[in-house]
Amino acid sequence: MILMNESQQARGQRTRFKICGLTREQDVDAAVAAGCDAVGFVMYSKSPRYVTVERAAALAGRLPPFVTPVLLFVNEAPERVLAACESVPGAWLQFHGEESPEQCLLASGNAKHPYIRVARIPLSGDGFDLVKFATEHARARAILLDAHVEDYGGAGKAFNWSHLPPNVNAHLVLSGGLTPANVTDGIVQVRPRCKTLAVDVSSGVELDGPGNKGLKDPEKIHRFAAAVRAADAPPA
């Protein structure tokens, strides 16, 4: 998954995006049809979007070339992470818990498997040293910004983007409460603050109603993709 700055935008390149928390074949197909760059599978058993390694491997097998599977872990034992990588060739890793830089390196096979480290940002946007965090996790391919909620992501809540540092020397992935309605604004606000920016959505493209976590709405996926492209469009 390749992550873009304003100069890249001026050359006509685009913001990459990932659809996370996929559990069904039709949702993988909808994400691919919308032009996503990566899809995420949740390996955290306490999540309502959890899938087994075997299920993730089967779903990832539907992906065409140049669409990257990403396996999301929360404080998992390194040997289990590495075993999952054997089952899903070419997968990136996403560490969403309290993993230290050393634990991330160990679980990724000393960065043999590319990984993203999640920064859990308070909803106010204050009280988190993102510059320090990104420096500590310099071996990560990107830092994913998610809202700090009681559980580990997927709560559909956005943090205050305007309180992020003005200059972070890292590739960032904006997540947390993104929807087709607000992702354009999120890209415009956050992209100037980092080396490159990608976006990641889960709950914002799910079917409405209780009990639908992990069940994606293809119309919302396509509207999300259109809103990402709108952020990249040159001014009229």
Image (spheres, rainbow, N blue to C red):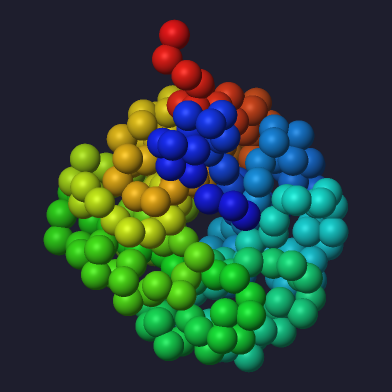
Q: In which quarter of the image is the C terminus?
A: top left
Q: Which residue is drawn at 79% across and 75% down?
A: 87
Q: Quadrant of residue 146?
A: bottom left
Question: Where 47 sits versus 66, above or below?
Answer: below
User: Left or right: 185 with respect to 121?
Assistant: right
Q: Is residue 176 visible in this depiction of the protein?
A: yes
For the residue pair 122 and 48, the one nearer the viewer reads as: 122
Q: Position of residue 203 (x, y in %)?
A: 51, 44
Quadrant placement of the N terminus: bottom right
Q: Which residue is drawn at 36% across and 31% down?
A: 188
Across and down, in percent, residue 170 comes to 38, 59
**Image check: 174 left or right of 148?**
right
Quadrant housing residue 215:
top right
Residue 152 appears in the figure:
no
Q: Residue at x 26, y 62 (%)?
A: 130
In this picture, is 104 found above or below 71? below
Where is residue 109 shown, x and y percent of the image?
61, 86
Residue 27 at x, y = what percent?
72, 43
Q: Relative to residue 230, is residue 77 depicted above or below?
A: below
> Which residue is nearer to you in this view: 176 or 190?
190
Q: Which residue is more in the foreground, 46 or 68?
A: 68
How many tags in the picture? 0
Instruction: List the single residue furthest toward the top.
Output: 236
Residue lying farthest left? 127
Q: Which residue is drawn at 56% across and 29% down?
A: 12
